[in-house]
Image (spheres, grey):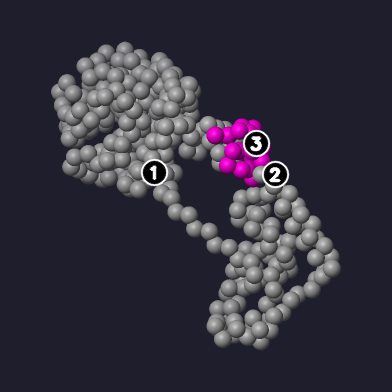
Amino acid sequence: MKSITLFTLLFSLSVGISYADINESLIAYYPLNGNCLDLSGNENNGTINGATLIEDKFGNNDHAYIFQDNAIDHFLLPHSVLNTLQTFSFSAYLTIESFNNSNNLVSCARTDHDNSFIIQYNQIDGNGWSLWFGDSQFEFESNSIMDDNQWHHVVIIKQLSIGKLYIDGIKIGNDLTLPEQSLKVDPGGLVIGQDQDCVGGCFVTHQGWEGKIDELRIYGIALSEDKINELYSKFMDDCSYIDLDKDGVIDKFDECPNTVQGTAVNNNGCKAETLYLQIEELLEKVNQLETANSNKNYTISELNSKIDSMFTLEQTQKMVSNILNWGDLNGDERIGLEEAIKALMITSGIIEK
């Protein structure tokens, strides 16, 4: 007969939440909250030249930048962000303030070709969004979509020889057939907001971006529609998603904005005092029970008999092993009630392991 402790069988937990992972293959992420720091963890920090801080879509001060078509305003990013890539995705929140220029958003240059790769929105000579590879232009069917001076989420994808455009989560036009080769960018040759006529400079008025830029992301993969919609919906609600104390309650609704990180909180962002009192009372009872029944294991013959009829020995051993891996915190091959409660608290994020 298989002998199994009572609490080993009573406590197990399975949690499954599925979201599109918007950080997979993320090369660089620039929230543009007063600087051009890369928060992807890859340290692809950029520098800001001339562009002015403004409110973002939700009215948060100094959380976006506006560019003037003045041959000055631009971001300089590490060339390694795009260099050698055959497949990539560019995502940003944008507005366009003027259509009397070529609105070059991204410019990649090298010494033997100043227009190695360009992303632009040009209504002077074209229909809106287009890509340049060397001297060849490839146009999306996008005329007038950006013409309202409002924020729009734009995703441009190069997947080997295929180009795709999404605006506000919607695919625009047909796929483009592009050159399949990798991008080649020289050091100092990746610029946001200007068209380079030499590596890192030689900017000309009427070729720069004239509008706002926020939430710039660059990926080393072709984003799926699920991930694009996740990025778009993340900023669609008419409120700020900033959560400075990282308690899971955004600042707009947080009545206790300086909660210690890791604290369990109510939906108003304040410490869940009632929960902590309940846990303390429960732990006290557990301590009393453990003292009274120190080192005692419980065997339930009826339950073991039922298990014998339902599972093979190998299946039961595997289940017990998995449950012990979850809840046996002190390595004694059994799970006491206190251990089970702690394991549940760890799993739910109330405490750290």
Which residue shows up at 32% across the image and 47% down it? 225
Magenta stretch, main secondary structure class: loop
Q: Which residues are magenta?
A: 253-271
| Mark 2–mark 3 distance (CA, rounded to whole Å) | 13 Å
Q: Amino acid at mark 2?
A: Glu
Asked whether residue 138 appears in the rendered view, the answer is no
- Say which quarter of the image contains residue 303: bottom right
Along the viewing direction, whichever of 273 and 308 lies nearer the viewer:
273
Q: Which residue is mark 2?
A: 273
| Mark 3–mark 1 distance (CA, rounded to whole Å) | 28 Å
Q: Which residue is mark 3?
A: 259
Q: Looking at the image, tell me whether mark 2 or mark 3 is earlier in sequence order.
A: 3
Expressed as whole percent of the image width and height from the top left, the position of residue 217 reads 39, 35
Expressed as whole percent of the image width and height from the top left, the position of residue 227 reads 37, 45
Expressed as whole percent of the image width and height from the top left, the position of residue 275 reads 68, 49
In the rendered image, the vertical position of residue 90 relative to residue 62, given as above or below: below
Q: Looking at the image, tell me whether mark 2 or mark 1 is earlier in sequence order.
A: 1
Q: Residues within 10 Å of mark 1 (few under 14, many from 20)?
A: some
| Mark 2–mark 1 distance (CA, rounded to whole Å) | 34 Å
Mark 3 touches mark 1? (CB < 8 Å): no
Q: Looking at the image, tell me whether mark 3 or mark 1 is earlier in sequence order.
A: 1
Q: Which residue is mark 1?
A: 230
- Say which quarter of the image contains residue 190: top left
Q: Is residue 197 magenta?
A: no
Q: Amino acid at mark 1?
A: Glu
Q: Is residue 280 left or right of residue 32?
A: right
In the rendered image, the vertical position of residue 230 relative to residue 291, given as above or below: above
